[in-house]
């Protein structure tokens, strides 16, 4: 006849972290989920389950302890935590704005190749970029040319190389100064205006109204501005080059006694057609950078009036950084190796 053993267990529930004493270990911590953590080690022990099996032969109960393998539960909880973290993560503003600029550039290229150009808006933007920026660009170029003339004429006069002054100034203006200075002025005047206008339209939901009316904002707003800037900047660069060289010649003749004819003749002998062509290519690339960055920053504006101001400032800064980086890259491509442009005017 088998003996029946009645075994009673007393359950303990812990609502908060408690410290207990187990097997002589002090400060052993019992967590909310019933796991035991040893002092100095935050790795929880495995959960154990104890149960009693009555023995029918000798009437004694046998205590058995089994360990639960919680690897699947732990991995499942980790996956849930990772998904929760990823759902709350958002990319930084500069990252998705930079990606939006590349996407917008691709859309503009596709629209131009397909011939989807708003002619009226393009002409309006051409009038706005080119004629209204001529005065500022010419004034800046004139003073930059005179400042460079002071430095070059003083040094070249001491070396008795006054016949080379015009060639050096012409090469400096055609290759670097005229495209970069013109682009900086246009970025400060036109790029900021583009970013502010499109940012205000985005905040006030005017771009959404264009979509409702069936017009594509890229065709109506972005493409005309890009085309106008890329066409206007080469023209402004040529005008700035002529103004810079003219102001240099007048200052050299009036202050340092170097004739204007010497300056112009030296510049004619030093210049090559590729110098002017490279300046035009640089200008178009700089114009594309200014217009794309300004329009992209304007169309991604958020946060009301404060966001418009931040987008305008950031657009100008990023445009200037992009101009300098592109200038370095294009100069490395166009003018590698030793040059001999000044040999004919020494």
Image (cartoon, grey):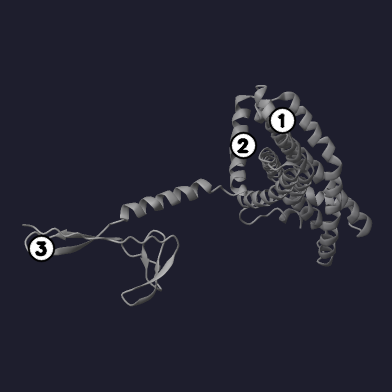
Q: Secondary structure at mark 1?
A: helix
Q: Residue furthest toward the top? A: 214
Residue shown at 80% from the left, 52% from the top? 266
Callout 2 environment at 10 Å: few (<14), some (14 to 19), or many (20+)?
many
Residue 161, percent across and down?
80, 62
Q: CA distance from mark 1 to mark 2?
A: 18 Å
* Image quarter (top left, top right, bottom left or bottom right) of the C terminus: bottom right
Check contact, mark 2 vs mark 3: CB within 8 A: no
| Identity of the residue drawn at 73% across and 55% down | 342
Label 1 crowd (10 A; few <14 / some 14-19 / many >=20): some
Mark 3, residue position: 59
Sequence-wise, which precedes: disc 2 or disc 3?
3
Q: Which-is-in-front pick, marks 2 and 3?
A: 3
Q: Toward the viewer: 256 or 332?
A: 332
| Vertical side of 94 occupied by 223: above or below | above
> In what element is the residue under mark 2?
helix
Is 154 on the left or on the right of 118, as rendered?
A: right
Residue 279 is drawn in which quadrant?
top right
Nearer to us in this view, 144 or 297: 297
Category of crowding for the residue at label 3, using alpha-carbon neighbours closer than 10 angstroms: few (below 14), some (14–19), many (at least 20): few
Q: Give the camera-side residue of 310 and 226.
A: 310
The percent coordinates of residue 22 (x first, y second) are 33, 72
Residue 111's place in the image compared with 180, above or below, is above
Q: Which mark is residue 283?
A: none
Q: Position of residue 169 (x, y in %)?
A: 79, 53
Number of numbered discs present? Answer: 3
Quick one: label 1 or label 2, which is nearer the N terminus? 2
The residue where tag 1 is placed is 206
Residue 104, numbered circle:
2
Q: Is residue 215 visible?
A: no
């Amino acid at each position: 006849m088998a003996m029946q053993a009645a075994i009673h267990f007393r359950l303990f529930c812990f609502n908060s972290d408690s410290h207990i004493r187990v097997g002589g270990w002090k400060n052993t911590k019992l967590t909310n989920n019933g796991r035991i953590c040893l002092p100095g080690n935050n790795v929880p022990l495995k959960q154990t389950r104890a149960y009693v099996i009555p023995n029918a032969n000798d009437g004694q109960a046998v205590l058995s302890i089994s360990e639960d393998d919680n690897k699947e539960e732990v991995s499942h909880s980790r996956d849930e935590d990772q998904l929760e973290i990823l759902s709350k993560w958002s990319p930084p503003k500069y990252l998705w704005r930079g990606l939006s600029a590349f996407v917008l550039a691709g859309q503009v290229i596709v629209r131009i190749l397909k011939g989807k150009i708003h002619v009226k808006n393009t002409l309006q933007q051409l009038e706005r970029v080119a004629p209204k920026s001529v005065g500022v660009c010419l004034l800046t170029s004139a003073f930059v040319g005179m400042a460079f003339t002071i430095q070059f004429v003083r040094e070249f006069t001491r070396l008795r190389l006054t016949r080379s002054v015009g060639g050096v100034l012409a090469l400096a203006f055609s290759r670097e100064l005229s495209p970069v200075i013109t682009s900086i002025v246009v970025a400060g005047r036109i790029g900021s205006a583009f970013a502010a206008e499109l940012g205000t339209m985005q905040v006030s939901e005017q771009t959404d109204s264009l979509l409702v009316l069936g017009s594509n904002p890229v065709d109506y707003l972005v493409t005309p501005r890009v085309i106008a800037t890329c066409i206007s900047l080469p023209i402004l660069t040529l005008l700035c080059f002529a103004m810079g060289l003219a102001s240099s010649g007048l200052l050299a003749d009036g202050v340092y006694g170097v004739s204007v004819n010497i300056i112009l003749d030296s510049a004619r002998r030093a210049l090559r057609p590729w110098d002017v062509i490279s300046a035009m290519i640089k200008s178009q690339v700089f114009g594309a950078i200014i217009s794309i960055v300004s329009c992209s920053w304007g169309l991604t504006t958020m946060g009301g009036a404060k966001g418009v101001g931040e987008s305008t400032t950031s657009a100008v800064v990023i445009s200037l950084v992009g101009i300098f980086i592109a200038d370095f890259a294009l100069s490395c491509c166009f003018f590698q190796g030793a040059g001999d442009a000044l040999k004919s005017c020494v």
